[in-house]
Image (cartoon, rainbow, N blue to C red):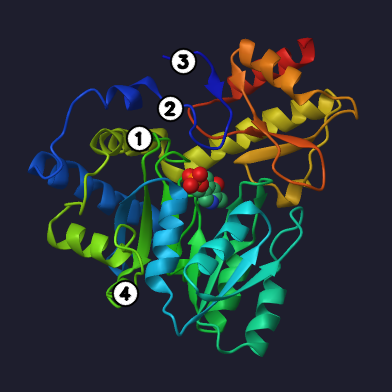
Amino acid sequence: MRPYLLLTPGPLTTTDTVKQAMMSDWCTWDEDYNLGIVEVIRKELVEIATSAPDEYTAVLMQGSGSFCVEATLGSVVRPEDKLLVAANGAYGKRMGIISEYYHIDCHVMRFEEIEPVNANKIDTYLNEHQEVTHVSVVHCETTTGVLNPLEEIAAVVKRHGKILIVDAMSSFGGVPIDMAKLGIDFLISSANKCIQGVPGFGFIIARRSLMEKCKGIARSLSLDLYEQWETMEKGHGKWRFTSPTHVVRAFMQALTELKAEGGVEARHARYCENHRVLVEGMRALGYKTLLPDEQQSPVITSFYYPSADFNFKDFYLKLKAKGFVIYPGKISQADTFRIGNIGDVHPTDFMKLIETIKES
Ligand SMILES: *Cc1c(COP(=O)(O)O)cnc(C)c1O
């Protein structure tokens, strides 16, 4: 079932048991599916996300992670509101692009791709622009692997009384986050990242009191987050349109496996160990990381090309033939490639990867 390991930040390597969970057909409106699977998932997602589960609610949405970011911005930010987006990579920029499509009044505060978002600059901007109503930020910028200082950013945004939207796509489930403690209002992630499911849908965890106020804001039918939520809430797990039933069933299996591993803390510890083995091994071979260690997430790591004549395509194909698929770089300032640490991959896999790179 595994011709090679995906050392990529989603889709990623899943367990055989997650894949096997897709071997039955489910009826999209039957109770076995709605009550037995969808409602269980919604409840468990909220429990993972916050220490105050009564204040939050979860909604699942068809499509990839970007569909869920778009659904959120387009269903939460009103035409008369103003959004501040802090962007230090492709996913932050994408929130700005979504805002353009929706004609949302939006300011994109740009940071270098190799620096974390600076909470003080957000503070200064909010002091000068009291008309801002919402702030959105990416937690782990998968573009480089930088982990933005979510606690500091959230503290500033909350001090100003603004609504905080977090793209935690590549960190949720793999890096501990407590929405209630930080004051996060909307958090977005998808099935095929740290929960270790397969691609096909994403989810939004929202402060219930705010979600209830979003009726009629959306400018898209399919991506109307409020309508999707209301249908799931009133219909006890019912989706508005055809749901990715097999993918959802696989996701429930992935949640069971997350619990069996020991929850988010244990998964975070494994990812950190994967990352440590990778970086120590690569440094011993002469490779340099793009980011300093203090800014680095355990999710994905960018490495500089080791020399000017380095041929990434050759390197990629050699590793693939030996069972490892890695990721090209995504930034313009430097020649880099990326190696993901998330998925059903373990420190021993990274030891083998280092041996393989040493021999190639
Ligand atoms: C994966 C990811 C997304 C969503 O990307 P899709 O290709 O739409 O799944 C958004 N933000 C971040 C930070 C991501 O890592």
Q: Are marks 1 and 4 in contact (CB under 8 Å)?
A: no
Where does the image place residue 291, in percent across and percent down from the top left?
77, 46
Dot 2, how many residues are within 10 Å of its Cα: few (below 14), some (14-19), or many (20+)? many
Residue to which mark 4 is pinned: 214
- Which residue is at a point 71% across and 68% down the rendered structure image? 118
Question: Which structural element holds mark 2?
Answer: loop
Q: CA distance from mark 1 to mark 2?
A: 8 Å
Judge whether residue 211 can be spotted in this image: yes
- Which residue is at a point 59% across and 33% down the rendered structure image? 341
Q: Is residue 24 found left or right of 262 in the rendered image?
A: left
Where does the image place residue 18, in percent across and percent down from the top left?
34, 27
Quadrant placement of the C terminus: top right
- Label 4 or label 3, whichever comes before in sequence order: 3
Q: Nearer the viewer, mark 2 or mark 4?
A: 4
Q: Is residue 311 above or below residue 83?
A: above
Amino acid type of the residue that numbered disc 4 sits on in the rendered structure: Cys
Amino acid type of the residue that numbered disc 1 sits on in the rendered structure: Ala
Who is closer to the viewer here, 240 or 190? 240
Q: Quadrant of residue 319?
A: top right
Question: Which structural element holds mark 3?
Answer: loop
Amino acid type of the residue that numbered disc 2 sits on in the rendered structure: Thr
